[in-house]
Image (cartoon, rainbow, N blue to C red):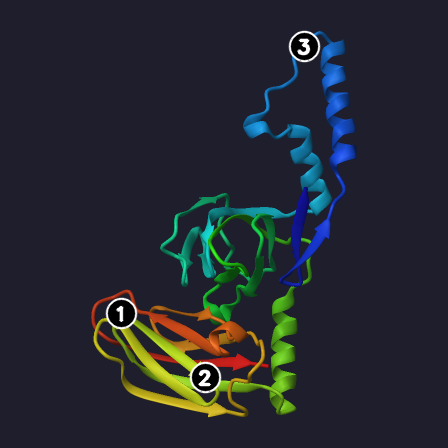
Amino acid sequence: MTLHRSLSSRVRRSVVTVPVCVGLFVAAAHAGAAHAGAAPAPQADGISPVLEVVASRSAGYGADRPLFTWTGRVDREVLIVVRGRDVSTRGFDAHLPNRTRVNSALPRTSANVVVQLDDGRGDVEVIEQPSARNGYQAVLRVRDPRAGADRYRLTAYVDNRGDDVSGRRDDDRGNNRRNGGAGALIWSGRVDDVVDIQISGRRVDAITRSGVRASDVNANIRGGGLPNRNVNLRIDQRSGRGSISVVQQPSAWNGYTAIIRIYDRRSGAAYYDFTAYWD
């Protein structure tokens, strides 16, 4: 059995050699039950309750608070966006079958979200941590490297024992900006319903997905354009009644193109103003 845990928002694979140990635990549990004259406890889905306990402790999540469990099929990439108790699936494979079991709400505080990949051949990572800048939402990305869809199962947690990384990210962003090592897009405009802001190099396009076409658009790239390497975009939303989120981070397979989605839930157009940072 292989467990994957995200450390510092990235998934690191750790092979936990539990079969022998688990076998001993299971054997001991069954022997104890037989000695007491009681039947062994029933096992759901063929998984021993002892195995579940060992796996949980081996992964190190005993002191963390589970947020939700997501199960679904992924062929290329999906984004899982969580805010409070609302968990939504977006991206290329959002149309494939998936379901979510919510355990608790994401708090409206700067928190460190980590993820455990229970099933699936690809990778999962937290690409956006909750903060005041993004309305306290977290974004997870699942990427499948092979042809054809595979089944994935993952669990997201709030790492109560981890450091508060939001302050460190703010310091890093400030240092990079002062040193000229970071780029940024300053964007403003009026949006009705859904608009995608697509960034490639120094080119910025506003693509209206639904509603009235975006108007009064002003886009300004500061520093270098979006580089031809993997970077993570972070959003600082200053104005707008709806949500602004990164739905596609730049990578080699998408030609290092980022997509930022503005979702205005109410009728009529509203003014939005944000800055997207990368380093």
For marks 1 and 2, the one nearer the N-term is: 1
Q: Are marks 3 and 2 in contact (CB under 8 Å)?
A: no
Residue 29 x/y as whole percent:
73, 21
Query: Left or right of 242: which side holds 44?
Result: right
Residue 9: tell me if it is visible: yes
Quadrant hosting residue 260: bottom left
Q: Quadrant of the C terminus?
A: bottom right
Name the residue beneath numbered marker 2: 200
Kind of residue sitting beneath label 1: Asp
Q: How many marks?
A: 3
Residue type, label 2: Ser
Give x and y (percent) for residue 35: 76, 10
Nearer to me, 193 or 44: 44
- Quadrant where the N terminus sits is top right
Question: The residue tagged with tag 1: helix, strand or loop?
Answer: loop
Residue 165 rendering spot, x and y as whole percentages: 64, 67
* Residue placed under numbered mark 3 in the picture: 38
Tell me: residue 46, above or below residue 41: below
Label whose residue precedes the other's in the sequence (3 or 1): 3
Mark earlier in primary sequence (3, 2): 3
Look at 27% across and 69% down and name the residue there: 193
Q: Give the left or right position of residue 239, taking residue 3 as reference.
A: left
Q: Looking at the image, which residue is at 64% across and 78% down?
A: 171
Q: How far, Cα to Cα, is label 1 from label 2? A: 23 Å
Hey, what amino acid is under mark 3? Ala
Q: Residue at x 28, y 65 (%)?
A: 265
What residue is pinned by disc 1? 193
Q: Residue at x 65, y 12 (%)?
A: 39
Left or right relative to 70: residue 209:
left
Q: Is residue 28 above or below residue 16?
A: above
Q: Could you tell me if the residues under marks 1 and 2 are in contact, i.e. CB atoms within 8 Å?
A: no
